[in-house]
Image (cartoon, rainbow, N blue to C red):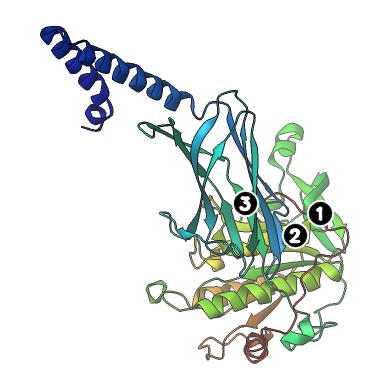
Amino acid sequence: MRSLVADAWILASALLALIGFASGSTALIVLGALIFCTGGAARLWSRISLEQVVYRRTLSEHRVFVGETVEATLILENRKTLPVPWMEMRETLPRGMPAIKVRTSPGSVPGSQVLERATALGRQDHLEWPITLQAVRRGYYRVGPTRLKSGDIFGFFEREEEVGRPVDGIVVYPLTYPLPDLGLDSARPFGEYRGGSRIHEDPSRVIGVRDYMPGDPMKRIDWYATARVGRLQSRLFEPSREQSVIVALNIPTFEQTWQGSDPVLLERGVAVAASIARWAADAGNALGLVANGSFADADRTIRIGAGRGPDRLSRVLEALAMITAFTTSNMAGDLEDSAYPLPAGATIVLVAAVMPDDLAATLMRLRDRGHFVAVVKTTHALWDRALDPIPVVSVAAAMEALEAEPDRAPVRDLPEGDVLTAVSGTPA
């Protein structure tokens, strides 16, 4: 039906021409020819209206903290000699980063808003629209895609297409606070480390093999070397004194998933985990992260291996920024996943609002294996599971005070030399 309406000019011009020939009316013939030529020119113009029209957007920052702004510039260029008499642009913006002093409308995609602009482009013309996006809460936000619509000078025919892909991503880091603001001692936030600075064998660093000795665990046997020499061989690991801190964030805020999620407790858990990660990085520890959520556009558990790289803290904060109430796995299983073994002797700091039985049992087993385990509790609710001798530190009261004072400035910068990296779902 739409195609019939769009091509009505052909039928009208042909009908007029036929009536003119039949009646011998020159006026009708000329009118039919005029409509045909005008319609054909309008159709051709609409088809080439968006040819060589280039759309670009630039962002001043791709990673910011809450309260900061991102300057975006939307650029349209007409690189052909034919002018564009009219054009409509619809830029998709994240609702979580409102545009300042700019009117927008709700988008068709949940969590989006649309900025509309109408203009005309002359030959070889160039237009720019600067806008400012305000980061009001942490998260991973997408800018784009963009739709352009134009047509002929008469407005008879239109052409529309989607541009601005791939979309631009903006990471808004979670708030972080100094540990004293959370009620923790910045020198020994979780008490004394059991055993001091011990030497561990690092299972990720194999330096050789030796003959099997009674008591060696089966996972230590190197079967390739055994087959080569004809007798059992055990791996030798490099000793290490490196202190690794694994921040583990248990995302659920209720015992049962059908109960939903408490947004206040979720944001509190993210902020506490980010603050502990910053402390661990500043203290020179190897830092890692485990959270039972997923990266953007991925269904893998958030997992960043322990390391001291210059970008480690920024990667952890990026991952925490992406966390939503949706969980992809069980924290108890994530901490004991044999595919991703924890570093030997690592300190595991669990941030949690709930403590299910299986997670409590996992923490006990990890402690028995030589890990230092501590729990940071983000709620006043009583837990039915006893965790002694694992230390449990409650930060609920301190966080409530911080949340009640929005003007109290959190830490908003990264340590000097911390390199910002691209968002990635690949474990390290």
Q: Is residue 120 above or below residue 37?
A: below
Please tell me in which quadrant of the rendered image residue 347 appears: bottom right
Local packing at callout 2 (Cα closer than 10 Å; few below 14, some 14-19, many 20+) is: many
Question: Can I make out residue 285 in this image?
Answer: yes
Question: Can I make out residue 364 in this image?
Answer: no
The tag earlier along the polypeptide, 1 or 3, is: 3
The tag earlier along the polypeptide, 1 or 2, is: 2
How far apart marks 1 and 2 lie (CA) works out to 7 Å
Give the percent coordinates (x, y) of residue 8: 23, 25
The residue indicated by pointer 3 is: 169
Q: Amino acid at mark 3?
A: Gly
Give the percent coordinates (x, y) of residue 52: 58, 26
Front residue of 147/357: it is 147
Viewed as shown, does residue 151 lie left or right of 312? left
Give the percent coordinates (x, y) of residue 2: 25, 33
Q: Amino acid at mark 2?
A: Ser
Viewed as shown, does residue 291 lie left or right of 195? left
How far apart marks 1 and 3 lie (CA) works out to 17 Å
The residue indicated by pointer 2 is: 314
The answer to whether the residue labelled 1 contacts the one labelled 2, judged by CB atoms less than 8 Å apart, is yes
Residue 224: mark in rendering: none
Q: Is residue 329 above or below residue 178?
A: above
Q: Is residue 175 above or below residue 169?
A: below
SS of the residue at dot 3?
Answer: strand
